[in-house]
């Protein structure tokens, strides 16, 4: 009985891998992935007022970044609000993490698919 179950489980995984490979090798999938990465990069540079601040936003916490990035007026107050900066900071983090996740998933699937497609 266990032998039949293991054969059935093996068949399910074989068909799932076949489905994933057929989706992966489709040109639309690769085009979408590369387009998503390019659009994410462009959007991040448009979202950040200064693209040179992006590495700073990735490394430091929002309060530290705000103190380094925000411009102070003559009387010592910041010209931009901290809540707006936090929203931008969160958007940049989410976009970067989603782009990294999409790239790693694509690279992982390509590495898995290549030996199966070309033995």
Image: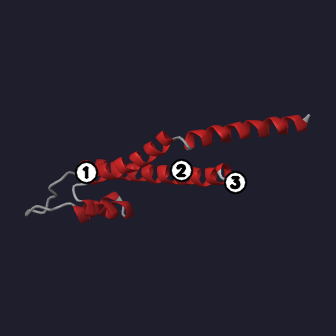
Q: Is residue 94 above or below residue 75?
A: above
Q: CA distance from mark 1 to mark 2?
A: 25 Å
Frontmost residue, 10 versus 68: 10
Label 1, secondary structure: give it: helix
Choose the circle earlier in sequence order: 1 or 2.
1
Q: Tag on residue 46?
A: 1
Q: Residues within 10 Å of mark 1 (few under 14, many from 20)?
A: few
Quickly name the residue at label 2: 105
Q: CA distance from mark 2 to mark 3?
A: 22 Å
Picture coordinates of residue 115 (x, y %)? 66, 54
Q: Tag on residue 34?
A: none
Picture coordinates of residue 79 (x, y %)? 14, 55
- Identified at 40% across, 53% down, the residue is 96
Choose the circle earlier in sequence order: 2 or 3.
2
Picture coordinates of residue 25 (x, y %)? 56, 44
Frontmost residue, 51 versus 88: 51
Label 3, secondary structure: give it: loop
User: Mark 1 and 2 residues: CB-CB less than 8 Å, in contact?
Assistant: no
- Identified at 53% across, 50% down, the residue is 105
Q: Residues within 10 Å of mark 3 (few under 14, many from 20)?
A: few
Q: Is residue 64 above or below residue 118?
A: below
Q: Residues within 10 Å of mark 2 (few under 14, many from 20)?
A: few
Instruction: Classify residue 13 by image quadrant.
Output: top right
Query: In this orientation, does residue 90 appear?
Result: no
Picture coordinates of residue 87 (x, y %)? 30, 47
Farthest-out residue, right: 1
Q: Nearer the viewer, mark 1 or mark 3?
A: 3
């Amino acid at each position: 009985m266990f032998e039949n179950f293991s054969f059935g489980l093996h068949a399910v995984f074989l068909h799932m891998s076949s489905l994933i490979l057929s989706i992966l090798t489709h040109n639309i999938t690769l085009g979408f992935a590369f387009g998503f990465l390019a659009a994410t990069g462009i959007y991040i540079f448009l979202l950040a007022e200064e693209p040179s601040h992006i590495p700073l936003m990735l490394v430091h916490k929002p309060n530290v970044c705000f103190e380094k990035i925000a411009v102070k007026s003559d009387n010592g107050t910041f010209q931009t609000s901290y809540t707006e900066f936090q929203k931008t900071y969160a958007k940049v983090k989410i976009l970067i993490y989603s782009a990294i996740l999409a790239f790693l998933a694509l690279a992982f699937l390509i590495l898995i698919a290549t030996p199966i497609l070309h033995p």
